[in-house]
């Protein structure tokens, strides 16, 4: 893809402009660091374009205060770019077990997904970040077929980026852009925990 030009131009009947502005389904997956960070970087670009942004976090606790959330909330309220709405789905369920049963967490994930479906149908946002969204599918809390069908049939010009390890092959097949983050080295390999300004 030299100089931003595609190697192949499909015979799909679309003009260059139509093809260029087609809404994308994107997936950031893999064992390496930076999946969410890259998605939030894309959200900054969307904010700059004035697009309404919806962030849905699935396994980070509502009590956690991450840097991207504060930055995007401030930017969204500034009136200079697009508005930003931030949703945390339940209490979060990640590497640390949260209060409540697994079924409670699954129900919260399903409720979050139903909200996303309503927002997609209403074309509430132009750019969606579904952060750590691969996990509810991996754990069987959400029907992957329903997710794929809903996302591929979404109306309008809504871009969606999904983050998380172990993305389902059906989601990868449906996506327009898939990036796999690989890990070469990580400070945790040497026993160092996450730190402010780097992990959050």
Image (cartoon, rainbow, N blue to C red):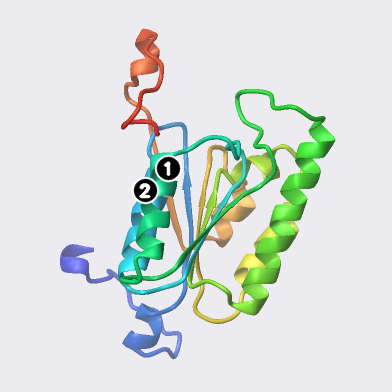
The image's mark for residue 35 is 1
| Residue 83 disc label | none
Element assignment for label 1 = helix
Q: In the drawing, does residue 95 fall left or right of residue 10?
A: right
Q: Is residue 49 above or below residue 27?
A: below
Determine the image quadrant of residue 138. Answer: top right
Q: Is residue 142 visible?
A: no
**Cα–Cα gap, marks 2 and 1:** 5 Å
Can you identify the residue that label 2 sits on? Answer: 38
User: Where is residue 28 shown, x and y percent of the image?
Assistant: 46, 47
For the residue labelled by badge 2, is the local secondary structure a helix, a strand or a loop?
Answer: helix
On the rendered image, what quadrant is the N terminus found in?
bottom left
> Extreme left residue here?
3
Residue at screen point 32% across, 63% down: 45
Q: Residues within 10 Å of mark 2 (few under 14, many from 20)?
A: some
Residue beneath the point at 74% across and 27% down = 99
Circle 2/circle 1 CB separation < 8 Å:
yes
Q: Residue at x 68, y 37 (%)?
A: 91
x, y percentage for residue 175?
A: 52, 60
């Amino acid at each position: 893809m030299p100089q931003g030009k595609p190697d192949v131009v499909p015979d799909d009947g679309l003009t260059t402009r139509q093809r260029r502005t087609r809404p994308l389904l994107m997936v950031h997956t893999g064992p390496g660091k930076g999946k969410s960070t890259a998605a939030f970087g894309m959200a900054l670009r969307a904010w700059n374009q004035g697009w309404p942004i919806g962030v849905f976090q699935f396994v980070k606790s509502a009590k956690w205060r991450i840097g991207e959330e504060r930055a995007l909330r401030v930017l969204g309220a500034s009136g200079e770019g697009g508005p930003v709405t931030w949703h945390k789905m339940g209490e979060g369920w990640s590497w640390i077990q949260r209060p409540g049963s697994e079924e409670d967490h699954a129900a919260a994930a399903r409720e979050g997904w139903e909200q996303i479906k309503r927002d997609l149908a209403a074309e509430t946002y132009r750019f969606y970040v579904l952060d750590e969204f691969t996990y509810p599918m991996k754990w069987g809390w959400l029907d992957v077929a329903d997710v794929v069908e809903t996302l591929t049939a979404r109306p309008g010009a809504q871009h969606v980026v999904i983050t998380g390890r172990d993305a389902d092959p059906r989601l990868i097949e449906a996506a327009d852009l898939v990036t796999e983050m690989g890990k070469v080295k990580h400070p945790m390999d040497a026993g160092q925990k996450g730190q402010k300004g780097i992990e959050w």
